[in-house]
Amino acid sequence: MKAIIVDDEKHVREGLMLLADWENQGIKTIFEASDVEEAIEIISKHKPEIIFTDMNMPKRDGIDLLKWLHTSKLNCKTIVVSGYDDFHYMRNAIACGSFDYILKPIQEDILNETLAKAVHEWKEQNQDRLSNIENNKVINEVKPLFWDYLLSGILDKPNLSTRAIEQIEKVYQVNVSSSPLTIALIPMKMIIQKKYRDDVNLAFFSLLNICNEVLSERKMGIAFRNMNKEEELVLILWKNNGIKVALEQISTMIYQCTAVQSPIVIGQSSIKCNEAYDSSVHSLLNYNLLENGRGIKVVLEKKPITKSIIHLFDYSEEIKWAIQSGSTEQIDGILEKIHQMFVKDNYFSLEQIQIWENQFELLKDHWLKEYEIQRQKNLYQGFDYWDDFGFFSLSKFKEEKRKEFYDLIETVFNVQFKKEKSSVEMIEEYIRANYEKDIKLQDIADRFYLSREYISRKFKQEYHETITDYLTKIRIERAKGLLENPYLKIYDIAEAVGYQNDKYFIKVFKKLEGMTPNEYRSQIRCLTPKMDK
């Protein structure tokens, strides 16, 4: 379990860290936050089960945090710790669903008693939630999420869990308890960025449908999203015959859907699940993107590659001088030198991309701090490394990195802090991020503490259409993207973009596009890219 202490006073956080009996309650990780903004960021990322929060803090107080937690639907217990014995704070804490309220100065016995009760209640409720998922829903209704969590947990273990073996046998009528397994991996990052514009859930929804349709027909395995690693789609295969043919079919369908030639890599078969997975990870990281060829690429693990990885850290001093002097010419010279090394070796791996991007982020953060520049989210981030045929392009990689360095140089030389977003811009951002949900004007008003009339008037002034029309336009645009996947049903697409009634979705689509979804799908099939044999 994890916990977080939110208090603007460091000595209070340290006191709670020392007084609470964390180990006895099974809490291994404790985060700290000095304000609400930092707390929301940590909670969103790490999802701690226990939250201690002060009420009176600068900028935004504990009430704001409690309101956010109340609407976030996170599975956690919140304990308010405050020196303000005030009915206003207590009332808001209760209204926002806090578990308990204790006053400063903190007494060790009361603190640990409250903590123990919170942990006990969380465990009981969590067990009820797990039981409800397993007992009250048909396995097919929760299949993606169920398999994602069940199978992600066994990738680092020698043997499949008893539960995983039982569920595979129950659903697929195959006993995998003593069978060798083969694991294949599909890296999703390039597809998510190029085709789905960073909509991770939509990307996995589309590709898992493709993979599991093929694997189900051949009764040879299952595909799932690795919940322990970002942007990785995993295929566990329990049949050896026909693996390459099946994966080539999947690769073809993915290309037809996304226009990206993503490799599918296969590790060595093994009785031990973790060995099979480690083998496929090794194969993926060492896959040479410069050996694309033209056609389907299913990569079997080969002998270890001895090519060296180029580290951006080795050029940090040269880059620093280029940034300090504002010299784009120096940056061009550094990038060209590195580029020629890649060309000479004729080797560029997915591991090289990861190392470059991670090291650039670290160096960029360091340089921004050195020049006392506030971290800017709108700095250019290059990721379009693929040519018109969907293959990796070393020259496009170089150009994207060049743009990133140019933008960083301009930022350093033109130190301007980003203006705070207007409320209407934040509402537009919220709509775009939650288009698949049932968004009501009153919900938006409550979330942003504005009147419905003001929101409607200002939004139309800024975007020249009503919120309803704007939401509809986003949904239909997302639907058009999904319609490019010929393997998705219309009712699945309707639900994925926020329509519970597929007939109404068809009516709305026809009104905006002048044709039905099926007519649109037929039209774009003519534009499907042809693959070179």
Image (cartoon, rainbow, N blue to C red):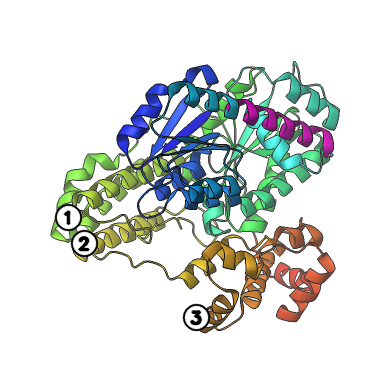
Which residue is disc 1 drawn over?
A: 322
Percent across and percent down for residue 364 are: 28, 49
Report crowding for label 2: few under 14, some 14 to 19, many 20 or more residues within 10 A (C-alpha): some
Of the image marks 1 and 3, the number of the one nearer the N terminus: 1
Q: Foreground residue, 93 or 273?
A: 93
Q: Residue at x 58, y 68 (%)?
A: 445
CB contact under 8 Å: marks 2 and 1? yes
Which residue is disc 3 drawn over?
A: 462
Q: Work out which quarter of the rendered image holds the C terminus and state it.
A: bottom right
CB contact under 8 Å: marks 2 and 3? no
Residue flagged by tag 2: what amino acid is it?
Thr
Residue 510 figure quarter: bottom right
Q: Which mark is residue 103?
A: none
Q: Is residue 472 left or right of residue 419?
A: right
Nearest to viewer (mark 1 / mark 3) = 3
Of the image marks 2 and 3, the number of the one nearer the N terminus: 2
Percent across and percent down for residue 204 are: 64, 48
Q: Work out which quarter of the rendered image holds the N terminus and state it.
A: top right
Q: Is residue 144 left or right of residue 226?
A: right
Where 456 falls versus 56 (above or below)?
below
